[in-house]
Amino acid sequence: MSIKCAFLFPGQGSQAQGMGRDFFEQSEVAREMIAEATKRTGIDFEYLLFEEDNRLEKTEFTQPAILLVSSIAHRLFENEMAIRPYYALGHSLGEFSALVSVGALDVIDAVALVHLRGMLMAEACEGQDVGMLVSLGLDDAKVEELCAAQREQGAKVWPVNYNSEGQIVIAGIKSDLVALEPVLKENKAKRAMLLNMSVASHCPLLESATAPLGEKLEEMLRDEFIAPVISNVTAERYATKAEALELLPKQLVSPVLYKQSIAKYDDEVDCYIEFGHGGVLKGLNKKATSKPHFTVSDMASLQAAIDGVNELARG
């Protein structure tokens, strides 16, 4: 198939109780993947995903749950369509789902890996009251300037997720983020709001997690990329284990250049396919691209994506 599709994978914040239920109820493949992930990690994913369980908001459980549901969505799509991505791009945690989609990580290995990643992140933040805050309506330079000014006064706040025009997420110490809120609003931010996050992602507070994550990546990564992945750290393509080993530990402490990645490669693709719950990236992409964007979050949207891609391919 000559159509060029970018495969997209969401990160933390896209989770919701019940995600993946339709796949589980209607697909033996989904049930097998959930059972394998449960056996490997000792996490009862059927309970975690489908029952009331506040662990889903804890990063060490959020991350493997999101990756597992995204990977199920991708596997079911892949089983129906013989199409390789032109490239794969994940938002934060989603970069690991992207690696699964291009063959650089085994899916069950990846579930275990991001469970460890979540634990390392939680340990790095332990004993510190950390958080994340979203700023809406200010340009990048202004948010960077305001955060830098706060750091000069001893605050620990960093812009970490460049999501879309006018939307940046800031990570750091929660009290410093609370103090930053009125500063952002005084500078005409439309909104500044703390997020429900248990860690401070993509900032220097996670430095202690980089080395042990790198060790596990060395063990699990394969040099078998069927397509390139776009790095959150650089917004550049990579397609080797050596590059991944250099970039993925840095991703823990570096900003996510999501909107920059979409802008850089938008002209090269015909459509986007987002695998996983929530359609979060579709929302972010509205301002950035007019290309078709399909989401695969249940069996109905899976079929809609298949039909949509086939229609595009027919021209």
Image (cartoon, rainbow, N blue to C red):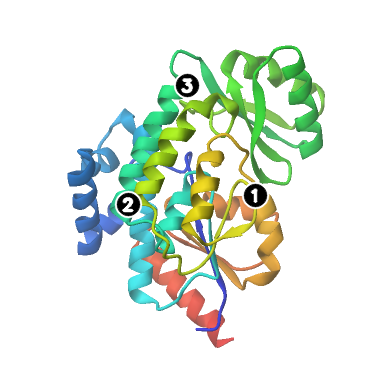
Dot 3 alpha-carbon crowd within 10 angstroms: few under 14, some 14 to 19, many 20 or more: many
Q: Dot 1 corresponds to which residue? A: 234
Q: Which amino acid does label 3 sit on?
A: Cys
Q: Do the residues labelled 1 and 2 touch (CB within 8 Å)?
A: no
Residue that mark 2 sits on: 20
Q: Quadrant of residue 45?
A: top left
Q: Of discs 1 and 2, which sits in the foreground?
A: 1
Classify 159 as above or below 270. Answer: above
- Give the CA separation, mark 3 to mark 1: 25 Å
Q: Residue at x 41, y 23 (%)?
A: 123
Instruction: For residue 289, say whether it is visible.
Output: no
- Residue, disc 3: 125
Q: Nearer the viewer, mark 3 or mark 1?
A: 1
Q: Which of marks 3 and 2 is nearer the N terminus?
A: 2
Spatial CA distance of label 1 from label 2 is: 31 Å
- Using a 10 Å C-alpha cutoff, classify the residue at mark 2 as few (fewer than 14 neighbours), some (14 to 19) or many (20 or more): many
Q: Which of 276 and 111 is in front in this view?
A: 111
